[in-house]
Image: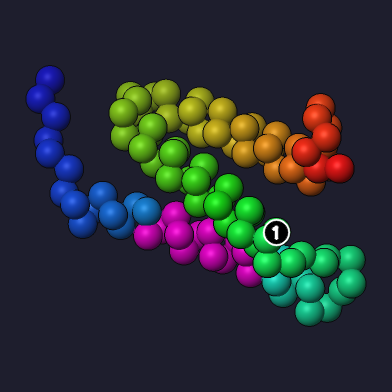
Amino acid sequence: MINKPENSTASSRAFLWVALATGLILLIPLTAMQFTAEVNWDGFDFLVMGAQLFGMGSLFVLVSRKVPRRVRLLSAGAFLLAFLYLWAELAVGIFTSLGS
């Protein structure tokens, strides 16, 4: 099977969507901070979560282009589990002392 060359605008469009989704997700804690003292993020928290969201999203885009279509759902689940584990580990340190 011969692969078509990727169009650079179509290729970068996926990463723009990842960046947009990252920004929209980061608006949730930013908005919550305006209404409650329970959410207290500083700039470093936003930087780490933004890097994690954009990094995982970008890696998923790259991997999903290389795997067959029927494996994409499985890889999406693996990326979601990895994201949730890293998020919990950084927040409270389940298995290590990263979050403490």
Q: Is residue 11 above or below residue 25?
A: above
Residue occupying image coordinates x 81% and y 27%: 95
Specify whether residue 28 is in view: no
User: From the viewer's perspective, is 15 left or right of 78?
Assistant: left
The spot of residue 3 in percent (x, y) is 14, 29
Residue occupying image coordinates x 82% and y 67%: 40
Choose between 68 and 87: the one closer to the eye. Answer: 87
User: Which amino acid does the dot numbered 1 rest on?
Assistant: Asp
Q: Which residue matches tag 1?
A: 45
Magenta residue span: 16-27
| Quadrant into which the C terminus falls | top right
The spot of residue 93 in percent (x, y) is 82, 37
User: From the viewer's perspective, is 60 left or right of 68?
Assistant: right
Category of crowding for the residue at label 1, using alpha-carbon neighbours closer than 10 angstroms: few (below 14), some (14–19), many (at least 20)? few
**For residue 43, which quarter of the picture?**
bottom right
Residue occupying image coordinates x 74% and y 43%: 90
Judging from the image, the colouring scheme is rainbow
**For residue 62, which quarter of the picture?**
top left
As for residue 42 lying within the magenta part, the answer is no
Farthest top residue? 1
| Quadrant into which the N terminus falls | top left
Labels in figure, total: 1
Q: Is residue 30 above or below residue 91?
A: below
Specify whether residue 45 is in view: yes
